[in-house]
Image (cartoon, helix red, strand yellow):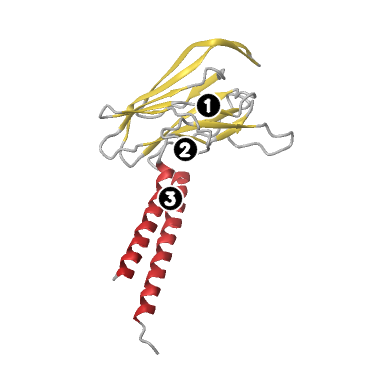
Amino acid sequence: MSFIRRAATVLAAATAITAGLALPALAHVTIQPGSAEQGAFTKVAFRVPNERDDASTVKIEVSFPTDHPLAFVSVKPLPGWDVKVTEGKLPAPVKTEYGELSEAVTKIVWSGGKIAPGEFQEFEVSMGQLPKDTDSLLFPTKQEYSGGEVVDWADAPKTDGTEAEHPAPMLKLVPAAADGATVSPAATTAPAQAAPSVTPVAASSSSSSDGTARLLGGAGLVVGVVGVVIAALALRRRPAA
């Protein structure tokens, strides 16, 4: 009997590990893709999952960096959602290849739509020119639910490498590719050359593939543990020769 209890404990632990593998894929507000070239123009999507089973996400507010302002920002219309782009004065003028910037986009707000429980939405933005003197940009985001709750995704990355409780969406910036090298599909050379449009849906193939891979990997682990338990029980029940 004690052996069966131990086997049940192992199986429960394996199940918990499986759940832990599956959850991160849907955990936070993120930027897709997560990286772009320094000095380039790019199109990104702020991917927002609904994490509540009793409320819908009804408003998204994304703050743009003012220490590394972006001279060109435009949004893709999203059916069912209203969008407001706010420009403001920068704390200090910033020199760019297009002249000195004293004002830039500081915030974009999407409202009027709904992300129901179990769904996510992507809010697309074309922006540039990306700075060349930093390796990342943070976009603190507020997610408001129909019940009035507001989740502030604004935590900076931790220095010890562990994940913050509410990490701000981060765009990693990598050095530009050398002449003749392959350039990331997300990067463009001018504001008008945005990547092909993508229709936001309740689930995307990339997210589904990632989540499915995690689930299948976790399920394989559980099946392996069950096999070991069954084999051990069979050996214990085999009559002595």
Q: Secondary structure at mark 1?
A: strand
- The residue pinned by badge 2 equals 163
Residue 98 at x, y = what percent?
Answer: 63, 14
Decide: is 96 above or below 60.
above
Q: Quadrant of the C terminus?
A: bottom left
Categorize mark 3 by other alpha carbons within 10 Å: few (<14), some (14-19), many (20+): some
Name which of mark 3 and mark 2 comes first in the sequence: 3
18 to 116, vertically: above or below: below
> What is the C-alpha distance between the residues marked 2 and 1?
27 Å
Q: Which residue is mark 1?
A: 126
**Percent from the top left, x then y, of residue 106?**
47, 17
Q: Residue 195 location, x and y as percent? A: 55, 33
Q: Amino acid at mark 1?
A: Ser
* Mark 2 vs 1, N-terminal side: 1
Front-lying residue, 197 or 125: 125
For the residues labelled 3 and 2, the Cα–Cα distance comes to 15 Å
Whether tag 3 and tag 1 are in contact, CB under 8 A, the answer is no
Considering every residue shown, the one lying at the far bottom of the view is 241
Mark nearer the N terminus (3 vs 1): 3
Look at the numbered discs 3 and 2 and tell me whether their residues touch, using CB distance below 8 Å. Answer: no
Q: Residue at x 34, y 80 (%)?
A: 237
**Which element is circle 3 on?**
helix
Q: Nearer the viewer, residue 129 or 195?
A: 129
Residues 45 and 165: in front is 165
Q: Position of residue 28 (x, y in %)?
A: 42, 37
Name the amino acid type tagged 3: Leu
Tell me the element at label 2. loop
The residue that mark 3 highlights is: 21
Q: Which residue is most to the right? A: 179
Q: Residues within 10 Å of mark 1 (few under 14, many from 20)?
A: many
Q: Quadrant of the N terminus?
A: bottom left
